[in-house]
Image: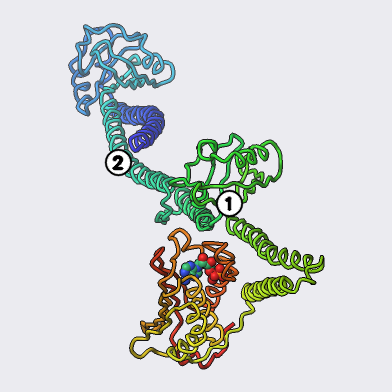
C-alpha cells in the first residue's frame, strides 16, 4: 500500500516534470539560439561598421592580380584580431583574402547566400556550415565600394560553437536543476505518501478493530482534510454501533436472565422441529443434563409423545395447543404443556412452555381421596344406625333385651358420627386458616400434669402406668393452653389405645433454649417403618379395623400436626414394631414479645 502510493505519486510528479521540461527545453533552446545568433550578428555588424570605417586601401582591392596584396592581407589580419574570421570577396565571387585560409585554395563564393544578399541589398546574413574550415559559422557580409575600385564584399564570420556551448550550458543547468527538483519532489512525495499511508493504515486498523468489537475511538488528527472527516465519521459510526450492540446485549442478557431464572420450561423450535432455544427449566423438567444445544432435533430430546404431537399440530397451523405430560417413574411429576405458534424468523416455529402442575394434581387427588374417605367413614355408622333402627321398627322394639343393646349400638355409632363431624369441622377450620391461637405463658410441668390427670383414668382402666419425666427446670412456653392440651391429650389417647395392658407411658420434656421438646413414649405395638411418614395424613391408619374398634377416626394425628405447626413447632415419630412408639413435638419458649402479641392467627 505504502510503496504503491509512493510510486504512484512519484510517477505522477515525474511525468508532470517531463511534460513541462520538454517544451521548456525546446523553446528555451530555440530562444537562446536565436538570441545568441542575433547577438552574434550584432557583434559582426558592429565589427563590419568598424571595418567599413577603416577600409582596406583601394589599391589593394584590384582584382587584376588575383592574389592578395600584402596591404589587404595586413588589413585582414588586423580586423581578425577581434576574433572573427574576415574574408574579402570580389563581386564575382573570387576570394581576395581570408584571415584563416589561403584564398588561392578557396572556391568561388558567388553562390553564398550572404554574398548574394550583400551584393544585392548592401548586407547579408547566414548561418551555415563552412566547407572551407568545416565548422558551423555565423556570417555577416557587407558591400564595400572604394572610390576608384570595383565593389567588394567584406565578410565577417564567427563560429557558432560558442552559441552551442552556451545553449548546452543552459541545458545542463536546466536538466540538473530538474533532477534536483525531481529528487526534492520525490522526497516530498515520499514523506506525503508515508504520512498519508500511515493515516490510511490507522483508519484501516481502526475499522478492523471495530469489526472485532473494540469500539474505542481513534484519535482524530487536526489535518482538516477528507481523511480527518472520514476518521470523525468512522468514530461516530463506531460509537453508534457500540451503543446499538450494548443495547442489544443488555436486552439479550435480560431476556436470557429472565428465561434462565424461570422455573417454567421454555423452548423454541423451528418448522423443521429443531430446537432454537431451551432454558435450564426445560432441561430440568425433561431430566436432561444441560439445556440442549441449538439445532438438535426435538425428537432426540423429548420422549413424551403428547408434547411432540402438540408441537406438530402447531407447526401444521394450529395457533395454540395445550397438553399434559408426566415425567419420572418413582416420583411422578405433572406438567401442563402450552405450545403456541411464533414466527422468530422468516419461517414459522413454535414456542413450548412447560408449567409444573404436580401440586395441583396432588391436591386434586387428596380432595378425591378425602371425599371418598369421609363418605366411607360415614357409611359404616350410618348403615349400622339405619340397620338397627329398621330392625327395631320391624319388631325388635318389643324384645326388651335386644332393644337396649340395639339402642346402645345406635348411640355408639351416632357418637362416632359426632366425633367424626367434630374432627372434620376442626380440620376444615384449620384449612381455612381460621384457627385463632391465644398464646399464653405456660409452665411446662403444670401443663403436663393437668393432661396426665385426664389420662390417668382410662390408663388405669387398661392397667397402664402413666408418668411424667421432666428433667431440671424448663423454661415456660408460649402456647394456646386448650389447643396444646388437645395435642398432648391426643398423643396420650393413642398411646393408651395402642399399648397392651401392663405397659408404660411416659411424658418427658427437654429444652434447647429456643424450644421445648415434648415426648410421649409408650411400650405399645409400634408403627411399621413404611407407615411412619404417612400416619399424620388424614384418615391414615396402620390397622383400619383396630382403629375403628377403639373408636379412632384417623384424624387425630393430622389435627395434632396442624396445631403444633400453628404454634411454630413440628411433630415427628420414632417407632419400632412390638417395642413401642415415641411421639415428639416442639413448642417455642416464651419470649417477651409473645406478651405483646397475644394472639396469633
Ligand atoms: P386414630 O383415630 O385412628 O388413632 P390417629 O390419626 O390418631 O388416628 O392415628 C393414626 C394412626 O397411627 C392410628 O390409626 C394408628 O395406626 C397409628 N398410631 C397412632 N399412635 C400410635 C401409637 N402410639 N402406637 C401405635 N400406633 C399408633
The answer to whether residue 560 shows anywhere in this view is yes
Residue 339 lies, in percent from the top left, at: 64, 46
Q: In the rendered view, tell whether residue 498 sits above or below residue 215.
A: below
Q: How is the image coloured?
A: rainbow
Given residues 163 and 465, the one toward you in this image is: 465
Find numbered disc 2 in the image and state the secondary structure of the residue it sits on: helix
Q: Residues within 10 Å of mark 2 (few under 14, many from 20)?
A: some
Q: Quadrant of the N terminus?
A: top left
Hey, which quadrant is residue 591 in on the image? bottom left
Where is residue 429, by image quadrant? Answer: bottom right
Q: In which quadrant of the rendered view does residue 151 lie? A: top left
Give the number of the disc on residue 211. Answer: none
Residue at the image position 37 percent from the left and 44 percent from the top: 201
Q: How many marks?
A: 2
Q: Which residue is mark 2?
A: 187
Location of residue 69 in the rendering, given as x and y in whole percent from the top left corner: 20, 14
Q: Residues within 10 Å of mark 1 (few under 14, many from 20)?
A: many
In this view, the residue in front, 556 or 367, is 556
> In the displayed structure, does residue 52 sit left or right of residue 343?
left
Q: Earlier in the sequence, mark 2 or mark 1?
A: 2
Q: Where is residue 376 shown, x and y percent of the image? A: 67, 61
Can residue 425 be seen in this snapshot? no
For the C terminus, give its image quadrant. Answer: bottom right
Q: Nearer the viewer, residue 548 or 250?
A: 548
Q: Residue furthest right?
A: 394
Residue behind mark 1:
334
Amino acid at each position: 500500500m505504502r510503496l504503491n502510493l509512493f510510486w504512484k505519486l512519484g510517477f505522477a510528479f515525474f511525468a508532470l516534470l517531463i511534460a513541462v521540461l520538454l517544451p521548456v527545453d525546446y523553446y528555451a533552446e530555440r530562444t537562446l539560439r536565436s538570441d545568441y545568433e542575433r547577438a552574434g550578428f550584432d557583434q559582426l555588424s558592429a565589427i563590419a561598421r568598424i571595418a567599413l570605417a577603416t577600409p582596406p586601401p583601394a589599391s589593394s582591392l584590384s582584382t587584376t592580380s588575383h592574389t592578395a596584396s600584402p596591404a589587404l592581407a595586413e588589413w585582414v589580419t588586423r580586423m581578425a584580431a577581434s576574433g572573427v574570421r574576415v574574408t574579402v570577396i570580389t563581386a564575382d565571387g573570387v576570394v581576395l583574402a581570408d584571415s584563416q585560409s589561403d584564398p588561392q585554395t578557396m572556391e568561388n563564393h558567388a553562390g553564398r547566400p550572404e554574398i548574394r544578399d550583400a551584393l544585392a541589398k548592401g548586407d547579408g546574413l547566414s548561418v551555415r556550415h563552412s566547407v572551407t574550415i568545416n565548422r558551423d559559422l555565423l556570417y555577416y557580409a557587407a558591400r564595400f565600394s572604394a572610390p576608384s575600385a570595383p565593389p567588394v564584399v567584406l565578410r565577417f564570420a564567427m563560429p557558432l560553437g560558442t552559441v552551442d556551448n552556451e545553449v548546452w550550458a543552459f541545458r545542463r543547468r536546466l536538466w540538473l536543476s530538474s533532477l534536483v527538483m525531481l529528487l526534492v519532489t520525490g522526497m516530498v512525495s515520499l514523506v506525503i505518501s508515508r504520512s498519508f499511508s500511515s493515516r490510511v493504515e490507522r483508519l484501516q486498523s481502526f475499522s478492523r478493530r471495530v469489526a472485532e468489537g473494540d469500539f474505542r475511538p481513534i484519535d482524530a488528527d487536526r489535518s482538516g482534510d477528507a481523511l480527518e472527516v472520514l476518521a470523525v465519521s468512522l468514530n461516530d459510526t463506531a460509537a453508534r454501533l457500540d451503543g446499538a450492540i450494548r443495547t442489544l446485549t443488555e436486552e439479550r442478557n435480560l431476556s436470557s436472565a429472565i428465561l434462565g431464572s424461570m422455573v417454567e420450561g421454555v423452548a423454541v423450535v423451528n418448522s423443521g422441529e429443531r430446537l432454537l432455544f431451551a432454558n435450564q427449566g426445560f432441561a430440568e423438567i425433561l431430566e436432561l443434563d444441560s439445556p440442549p444445544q441449538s439445532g438438535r432435533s426435538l425428537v432426540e430430546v423429548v420422549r413424551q409423545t403428547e408434547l411432540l404431537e402438540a408441537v406438530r399440530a402447531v407447526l401444521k397451523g394450529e395457533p395454540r395447543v395445550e397438553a399434559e405430560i408426566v415425567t419420572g417413574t418413582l416420583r411422578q411429576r405433572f406438567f401442563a404443556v402450552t405450545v403456541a405458534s411464533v414466527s422468530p424468523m422468516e419461517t414459522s416455529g413454535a414456542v413450548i412452555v412447560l408449567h409444573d402442575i404436580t401440586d395441583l394434581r396432588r391436591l386434586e387427588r387428596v380432595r378425591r381421596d378425602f371425599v371418598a374417605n369421609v363418605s366411607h367413614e360415614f357409611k359404616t355408622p350410618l348403615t349400622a344406625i339405619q340397620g338397627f333402627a329398621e330392625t327395631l321398627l320391624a319388631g325388635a322394639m318389643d324384645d326388651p333385651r335386644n332393644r337396649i343393646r340395639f339402642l346402645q349400638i345406635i348411640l355408639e355409632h351416632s357418637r362416632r358420627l359426632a366425633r367424626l363431624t367434630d374432627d372434620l369441622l376442626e380440620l376444615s377450620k384449620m384449612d381455612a386458616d381460621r384457627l385463632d391461637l391465644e398464646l399464653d405463658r405456660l409452665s411446662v410441668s403444670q401443663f403436663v400434669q393437668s393432661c396426665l390427670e385426664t389420662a390417668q383414668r382410662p390408663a388405669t382402666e387398661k392397667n397402664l402406668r402413666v408418668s411424667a419425666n421432666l428433667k431440671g427446670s424448663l423454661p415456660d412456653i408460649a402456647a394456646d393452653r386448650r389447643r396444646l392440651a388437645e395435642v398432648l391429650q391426643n398423643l396420650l389417647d393413642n398411646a393408651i389405645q395402642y399399648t397392651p395392658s401392663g405397659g408404660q407411658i411416659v411424658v418427658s420434656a427437654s429444652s434447647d433454649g429456643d424450644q421445648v421438646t415434648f415426648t410421649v413414649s409408650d411400650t405399645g405395638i409400634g408403627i411399621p417403618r413404611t407407615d411412619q411418614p404417612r400416619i399424620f395424613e388424614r384418615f391414615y391408619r396402620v390397622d383400619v379395623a383396630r382403629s375403628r374398634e377403639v373408636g379412632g377416626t384417623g384424624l387425630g394425628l393430622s389435627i395434632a400436626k396442624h396445631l403444633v405447626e400453628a404454634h411454630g413447632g413440628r411433630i415427628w415419630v420414632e417407632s419400632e414394631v412390638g417395642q413401642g412408639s415415641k411421639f415428639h413435638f416442639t413448642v417455642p419458649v416464651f419470649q417477651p414479645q409473645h406478651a405483646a402479641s397475644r394472639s396469633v392467627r
